[in-house]
């Protein structure tokens, strides 16, 4: 496909090297550390037909590229890309679903166990020599035994988490805007209702205007003093101030957080909470899974220019057709 060598793909942000290498085999690739139109020459802006993105792509940047056809986002969550705007401009947006589902579900379970059983704190205790000097680590107040688990966002990853939780012998319920067909888990029509029915809430909902700060003081109050909150979805879905307050005051017992509203900044109030297990957004961050995500980013761009079809279009741009 010699003519594909003339197609210009813009890499935005620090994209996985495997994706960049695969794209370079087929296309002319240029890169920018972030989506800043003033950093592109007029000629480059005219020539860009695809973006492979590991970072934000906003509406003004999309508007600055008159021949843009596709934005391939690295990650299943694409809240950093203005997909609605892309859709209205006839620009395809793709993400990386499925290939990361099991990895992220594994991480969610790790966070849950760490939050309940304080494993990182127990390890620190050992490393600090306290096992020898002070004796056994104190018994943990938290346990998974007898818990009732609620999942906010029973989608691909939510279902994979639920399968794991089932193996732990714990009952599961969930909140989505719509019921999921073919599962036996109890459905609740609102997040606060779900939180009131369980003592363990796992959030794996996407970051959207509708989910912004959905996990608020009222939801945490409903979760209760034995409550454990795990967030593996997006930080924007949580009122972090209310969460830090709930952890500090004992409104809930503990939290396990992989995501934050303004990464990599983590609020001081959360850092101060000893009853929170905090991870630097590592849900999908294994070499195995990140390579699979990189392949899917490259496959989306290649398929678009080879066959006129994206492999994994997001819902906002499913109507977009090649050349249309
Ligand atoms: P998915 O299959 O699209 O599932 C999302 C679920 O959220 C759906 O069940 C959806 O159900 C529900 N939902 C969406 N908007 C909602 C709303 N306003 N209120 C209530 N429920 C809502 O996506 P996925 O593949 O499972 O991924 C989920 C999210 O996980 C991603 O968007 C991403 O933000 C996050 N994630 C994080 C990491 C990490 O490293 N920590 C890695 C991968 C993904 P309804 O449409 O019926 O409401």
Image: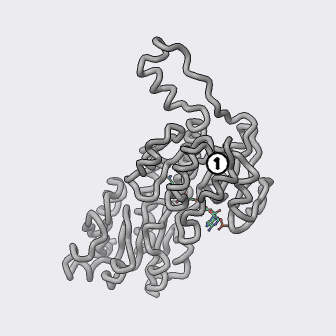
Q: Mark 1, residues whose alpha carbon is within 10 Å: few (<14), some, or many (≥20)?
A: many
Image-based side of 215 in relation to 223, left or right: left
Place of residue 221 in the rendered image (x, y in percent of width and height, measured from the top left): 66, 53
Q: Report the image quarter containing ligand 1.
A: bottom right
Residue at position x 57%, y 38% from top? 115
Counting every numbered tag in the picture gives 1
Q: Residue at x 47, y 75 (%)?
A: 83
Relative side of 56 to 193, left or right: left
Q: Quadrant of the N terminus?
A: bottom left
* Residue marked by disc 1: 161
Q: State the scheme by which the image is colored.
A: one colour
Point out residue 172 in the picture as x, y percentages from the top left corner. Answer: 74, 49
In this rendering, would 121 be left or right of 45? right
Relative to residue 301, is residue 246 depicted above or below?
Answer: above
Q: Position of residue 38 (x, y in %)?
A: 22, 76
Q: Position of residue 132 (x, y in %)?
A: 47, 12
Viewer-proximal residue among 222 and 302: 222
Q: Give the answer, above or below, for where 184 lies relative to 287.
A: below
Identity of the residue drawn at 48% across and 85% down: 88
Q: Is mark 1 within 8 Å of ligand 1?
A: no
Instruction: Using the rendered view, name the quadrant where residue 323 is placed.
Output: bottom left
Element type where label 1 sits in the image: helix
Q: Residue furthest bottom?
A: 324
Q: Is residue 82 above or below residue 19?
A: below
Residue 198 or 178: which is nearer the viewer? 198
Residue for point 46% across, 17% down: 130
């Amino acid at each position: 496909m010699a003519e594909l060598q003339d197609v210009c793909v813009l890499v935005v942000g620090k994209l996985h090297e495997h994706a960049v290498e695969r794209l370079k085999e087929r296309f002319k690739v240029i890169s920018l550390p972030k989506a800043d139109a003033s950093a592109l020459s007029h000629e480059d802006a005219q020539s860009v037909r695809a973006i492979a993105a590991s970072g934000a792509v906003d509406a003004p940047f999309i508007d600055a590229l008159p021949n843009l056809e596709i934005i391939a986002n690295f990650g299943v969550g694409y809240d950093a890309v203005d997909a609605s705007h892309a859709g209205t401009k006839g620009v395809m947006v793709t993400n990386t679903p499925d290939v990361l589902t099991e990895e992220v579900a594994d991480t969610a379970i790790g966070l849950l166990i760490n939050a309940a059983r304080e494993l990182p704190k127990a390890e620190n205790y050992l490393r600090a020599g306290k096992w020898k000097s002070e004796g056994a680590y104190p018994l943990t107040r938290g346990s998974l035994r007898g818990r009732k688990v609620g999942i906010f966002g029973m989608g691909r990853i939510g279902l994979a988490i639920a399968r794991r939780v089932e193996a732990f012998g714990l009952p599961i319920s969930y909140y989505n805007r719509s019921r999921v067909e073919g599962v036996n888990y109890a459905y609740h029509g609102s997040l606060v209702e779900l939180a009131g029915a369980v003592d363990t809430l796992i959030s794996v909902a996407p970051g959207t205007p509708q989910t912004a700060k959905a996990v608020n003081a009222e939801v945490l109050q409903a979760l209760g003093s034995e409550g454990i909150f795990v967030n593996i979805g997006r930080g924007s879905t949580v009122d972090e101030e209310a969460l830090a307050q709930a952890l500090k005051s004992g409104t809930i017992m503990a939290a396990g957080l992989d995501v934050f509203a303004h990464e990599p900044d983590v609020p001081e109030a959360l850092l101060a909470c000893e009853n929170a297990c905090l991870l630097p957004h590592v849900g999908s961050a294994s070499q195995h899974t990140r390579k699979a995500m990189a392949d899917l980013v490259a496959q989306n761009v290649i398929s678009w220019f080879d066959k006129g079809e994206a492999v994994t279009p997001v819902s906002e741009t499913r109507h977009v057709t090649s050349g249309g």
